[in-house]
Image (cartoon, rainbow, N blue to C red):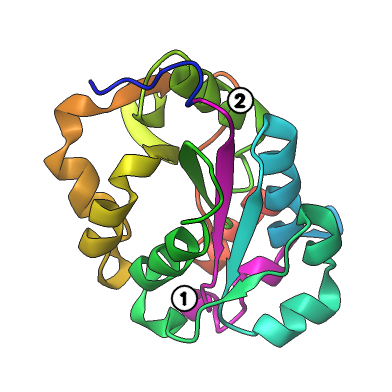
Amino acid sequence: MARTTEDERTSVAGLLLAAGGGRRLGGRPKALLEQRGTPLVERAARELLAGGCAPVRVVLGAAAERVRARTDLAALTGHEPLVNPDWAQGMGSSLRVGLRALEDSGASAVLVMLVDQPGMGAAAVARVLAAHRAGADLAAASYDGRRGHPVLFGAERWAEVAASATGDRGARAYLRAHAEEITLVECADVAAPDDIDTPEDLTLLE
């Protein structure tokens, strides 16, 4: 496992992928789904901040203007949300947009979270960040031993991650190729990895 020095572990950026159009939800953009009156995109950005990520960047896509009108992500994160014009091509394109925007951030790593996992919170974010501060440059939350989100990539890995991110697979190909290098951080006691894909999954918002 590659390691970073204490001086290099300065800050970890948070990257929230929130561009999905909710095709299986009847075209309801996932960013605008609400949990207890709060849009998921705003809830997730707050959890990244509370978990210790800085800066936090949000990638929008479907209904980006509606999301901007409904939320004040710029005030919350200190940055205007990014817009991926190619969001319909899949998560990989949004990951590339986010990594590109963070190239000059000075962050030693990025922690990637998905907007449609309402059971994910600051506690899981903080645990994965702690693994980075302990030396890991590739780490992921795990749930009863099974890898999930959030996922952390050291800055030196970003170019290769971006190059491998195609379609709706995100960083899956990269993570599979580097499976033996991943530090898994058990989070089943503080978070749930369930995501919202179908109308039946909307019960997760209750």
Q: Secondary structure at mark 2?
A: helix
Which stretch did the figure color magenta?
A: 9-35
Give the crowd class for mark 2: few <14, some 14-19, many >=20 residues within 10 Å: some
Rendering coords of residue 82 (x, y %): 60, 72
The quarter of the image holding the N terminus is top left
Q: Earlier in the sequence, mark 2 or mark 1?
A: 1
Q: Is residue 106 above or below residue 173?
A: above
**The one of 173 and 161 positioned closer to us in this rendering:** 161
Q: Secondary structure at mark 1?
A: helix
Closer mark to the observer between disc 2 and disc 1 = 2
Give the crowd class for mark 1: few <14, some 14-19, many >=20 residues within 10 Å: few
Residue 126's mark? 2
| Magenta highlight on residue 194 | no
Residue that label 1 marks = 24
**Quarter location, residue 162:** bottom left
**Quarter location, residue 116:** bottom right
**Mark 1: amino acid:** Arg
| Magenta highlight on residue 22 | yes
Rendering coords of residue 94 (x, y %): 44, 69
Rendering coords of residue 15 (x, y %): 55, 52
Disc 2 versus disc 1: distance between alpha carbons?
A: 31 Å
Query: Residue 178 vs residue 130: left or right?
Result: left
